[in-house]
Image (cartoon, coloured by chain):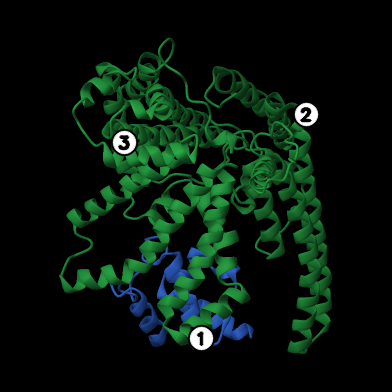
Amino acid sequence: MEKLIEILEELNPEVDYNTCEDLVDGRHLDSLTILSLISEIEDEFDVVIPTTEIIPANFNSAKKIWELITRLEEEI
Amino acid sequence: MSYFGLFPLFVFLPLVIIIYNILPKKVRPIVLLIASYIFFYIISNKLIVFVILSSLSIYIAGLIMKEIDKDRDKLLEKVQEKEEKKLIKSKYKKRKKVILILTILFNVSFLFFFKNLNFFTLTFNDILKFLNIDYSFKIIKHLAPIGISFYTLEAISYLVDSYNEKIVPSNNIIKVLLYLSFFPTIMEGPITRFNEIDSSICSGEKVTYHNLCFGYQRIFYGLFKKYVIADRLNIFVKLIFSSYLNYSGVTVLFGAIFYTILLYMEFSGTMDVVIGASEIFNVKLPENFKAPFFSKNISEFWSRWHITLGTWLKDYIFYPVSLSKCVKKVAGLFKKLFNSHISSLVMGFVALFAVWSLNGLWHGAGWTFILFGYYHFILIFLGNIFEPFISKICLKLKINRNNRIYKSLRIIKTTFLIFIGELIFRAPTVNVATGMIKRIFTNFTFNNFGSEMLSLKLDIKDYAIVIISLIVVFVISVLKEKGKNVRESISKKNIVIRWSLYYLLILSIIVFGAYGVGYQPVEPIYADF
């Protein structure tokens, strides 16, 4: 989780990722930032995020993104 | 025919509501389907066959994919090995892919034939002429089925979502037929997803007094936007775009501003009518606009303007293209050579190019629409390139980007860029578009401003009505932006205030609507796409 927060802070340092729950809906992460985020996550955690998982519900908070990573790791 | 006419709103719709309500619950979805086909037939006559063909194709393809999934799951139950499971999944996925691609091609071929073939033929003929080849391909003149651009995108989303198991393809044929042809949405969207209206479209719930009131309130608000504002500005816009050389740059800029307002009022007004009419039948449609002129950059504008088209392109083009294997490979190389920002820019460049090429073509087969698409592509891409630098500069200069003044300046900049974009969109040719933009920047004088503005068929009274009406729309937009439900708040007021407001809205449409001699009603703009 710490590594994920680190990645997110590098992409947009102006957000408090421990509390923010509208990263996508509140436009803190736009489509291109999500692309960077996916690329970083795939490299760091060795998972592949399918396009069907790119929905606001999976990216609205650091916690949700972490849950997605954990789920994808288990599916491998 | 447009949704704003007396017949669709005050004859057809009430008749459907009455028949829908008096018949038993089970039959009501069929009533909606028959009403939808009658509506389609009135506008597009025999071309109704194409919407039926599209609907049947996705219904059958969905069922085949569902069967393939069932067979796969049965087989998977018997297997324990992870590797073997992966092989089975991949084998069955390939089978589904064949169905998916064939059905998408079947649907897109109609869209291409009706919407784009003549444009490509004309372009090809121009190339042949340029190469001095004495041959030209024949242009076939034909009408397109109404709403084909909208329902084809809905058909593709149904197929892709079934393929990805995001939805369960329906066994209920009425539901699928109705999904593509539901009469409130058939002409101009919003582009809905099957899972958004799956449960409500065939629920057969009775029309209640509450739904009827709320639905017609929203319809009247749409009529207000169209008749009082859009129709009033139409004559001005027409004159400027047909003879811009007679006017100074500042008046031409007002032409672009008024067209943007007109387009917003017409299209968002249509959405109010469409969403209101659907609400009467308990069908909750997604919103297509969310105060777009409060956007701080072009990307944000497109997440607030024609939202359902934007999300469709994002879900079915942007992410699948940017995360495809070959794009990822190239981006990986850039990451090794440079950094992750450059790598994501490469991914975004390819995907955005695909999105905006399609966005331009979807709006119409013409060079102005293609230029309109690439104009936004360049603006969004440049915005992404410079964003980290701007962010660093602001940090160094200690500029708070959430500051009101900074935000307002960004909104003004974005709005101006949107005016130029819509000018390109409206211009009859690329030459006119570039000529008008040139005139704005080279002939910006206020010398004859007053007399020019009054020579364009609008008088002081017209301007006053437009300004007051825009203030009303602006206040409602601000309240909505702050998360307030205006209709709910009004419904809680006492009966005198409530009905005074309703009558005021209806009276303002009757009294201040731009009808009769001197005005030209706006034709449904998006129904042609």
Q: CA distance from mark 3 to mark 2?
A: 43 Å
Q: Which chain identifier belongs to the green chain?
A: B
**Circle 2 marks a residue in which chain?**
B
Q: Which of marks 2 and 3 precedes in the sequence?
A: 2
From the viewer's perspective, is B196 left or right of B471? right
Q: CA distance from mark 1 to mark 2?
A: 54 Å
Nearer mark to the viewer, of 1 and 3:
3
Residue named by callout 2: B46
Q: Amino acid at mark 2?
A: Lys
Q: Are marks 1 and 3 on the same chain?
A: no
Q: Amino acid at mark 1?
A: Asp
Q: Which numbered disc covers residue B245? A: none
Nearer mark to the viewer, of 3 and 2:
3
In this view, the residue in front, B292 or B63, is B292
Q: CA distance from mark 1 to mark 3?
A: 49 Å
Residue named by callout 1: A43
Residue furthest to the top: B517
Task: Tell me, yes or no, whether the two marked residues, 3 and 2, touch with CB atoms within 8 Å.
Answer: no
From the viewer's perspective, is B309 left or right of B484? right
Residue located at (39% from left, 57% from top): B379
